[in-house]
Image (spheres, rainbow, N blue to C red):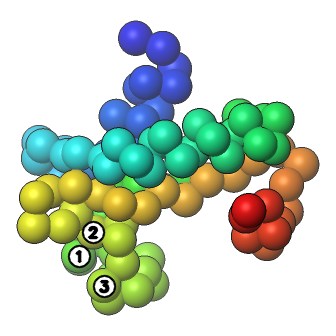
Amino acid sequence: MTKRTEEIIAASKCPCPKCQDKEAKIDGNLLLGLLVLESKIGRTTTITSGGRCPEYNKSIGGYISSPHIPDEFGVTRALDIQAYGIKPKQPKELKG
Ligand SMILES: [Zn+2]
C-alpha cells in the first residue's frame, strides 16, 4: 500500500478513539477533485483532516452541518489539505 493510499484511508475515518472500528468512506469525486487540484498547482498535498463524527467535529469547532461528518450513506464529503508553498487562502484563487 502506498503512503498516499494509507493517508486517504486514514482520512476517511474520524480520528477519535471511539470511531476507530467504524467503517468509513470518502466521496470519489472529492478525491478526483484533489488530484485535479494537485495537477493544477503542480504539487502534492497533505490531507490534514477528513471524516469526523459529530462529537469530534464539535470538539474541534467544526460547523454543525460540516461535510466532514459522514452523510446518511456514511460518506465523508470534505477534506482539509495543505500544500507546501501555498498559503491557506490561495486555493480559493485557483478556481476556474
Ligand atoms: Zn469520532
Q: CA distance from mark 3 to mark 1?
A: 9 Å
Is label 1 in a helix, a strand or a loop?
helix
Q: Outermost residue, bottom direction?
A: 64
Residue 80 is situated, as x and y percent measured from the top left of the image, at 55, 59
Mark 2 and mark 3 in contact (Cβ < 8 Å)?
A: yes
In the rendered structure, find residue 54 and report the number of the disc placed on it: 1
- The reply to whether callout 2 and callout 1 are in contact (CB within 8 Å) is yes
Q: Nearer the viewer, residue 31 or 16?
A: 31
* Direction from residue 72 to residue 89 in the image, left or right: right
Residue at left offset 19%, top offset 46%? 24
Could you tell me how many numbered marks the image carries?
3
Between circles 2 and 1, the one closer to the viewer is 2
Q: Nearer the viewer, residue 67 or 55?
A: 67
Which residue position holds label 2?
A: 69
Give residue 65's mark.
3
Q: Is residue 72 above or below residue 14?
A: below
> Vertical placement of 21 versus 86: above or below?
above
Q: CA distance from mark 3 to mark 2?
A: 7 Å
